[in-house]
Image (cartoon, helix red, strand yellow):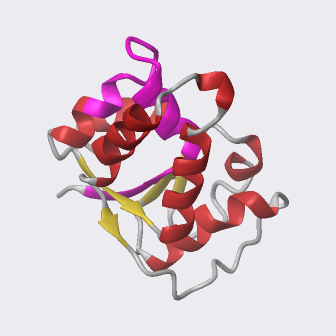
Amino acid sequence: MRQRVVFDTNTVISALVFTGGRLDWLRAHWRERGSIPLVSSATAAELKWVLGYRKLKLSAEYQLELLGDYVSYCEAVEVTETCPIQCRDAKDQPFLDLAQSGKADLLVTGDDDLLALAGQTAFLIETPEAYRLRSEAGH
């Protein structure tokens, strides 16, 4: 059974923008329906905003293409619940609330503020590397 997964913005950006990078495998993972990525209006808006960072030097057209290359594989979730565990960085809370509302199996992140909450939520919180190892093992 495919897992319901929230990927944080940095994880998605690394997979989409840095072709051949350490998270490039995630693009094929989404396309092959290896998981059910979850997205909310807040997390999609943040992704769109980060794709527009000047330092990434992406054209407006390419930004839209990359955004579509992710959200087209996602299940949109209306956030109706607040995660009972609060993150010390308020900017990360939308990912916890999405995972809670979307009944996610896990949240995949490299963010230390989110990783510090591992074991305290109803869903797993793990690094992209740990997620890859578990995915490849079939768990």
Which of 81/134 is in front?
81
Q: Residue furthest bottom?
A: 80
On screen, residue 11 above or below 48: above
Q: Position of residue 54 (x, y in %)?
A: 66, 29
Residue sitting at 51 percent across and 34 percent down?
13
Which one is nearer the viewer's eye here, 98 or 48? 48
> Which residue is located at x 57 percent, y 22 percent?
57
Q: Quadrant of the C terminus?
A: top left
Asked if residue 1 lies left or right of residue 97, the reply is left
Is there any visible trace of residue 127 in the rendered image?
no
Q: Position of residue 104 (x, y in %)?
A: 41, 66
- Residue 97 placement: quadrant: bottom right
Q: Residue 15: within the magenta?
A: yes
Q: Which residue, as the protein is rendered here, is positioned at the far top?
A: 20
Tell me residue 96's x, y (percent).
61, 66
Q: Residue 52 falls in which quadrant of the image?
A: top right
Q: Is 8 in front, or is 17?
A: 17
Residue located 41% across and 74% down the image: 102
In this picture, which residue range is highlighted in magenta?
Answer: 3-27
Residue 107: x %, y % from top left: 51, 54
Q: Residue at x 24, y 52 (%)?
A: 73
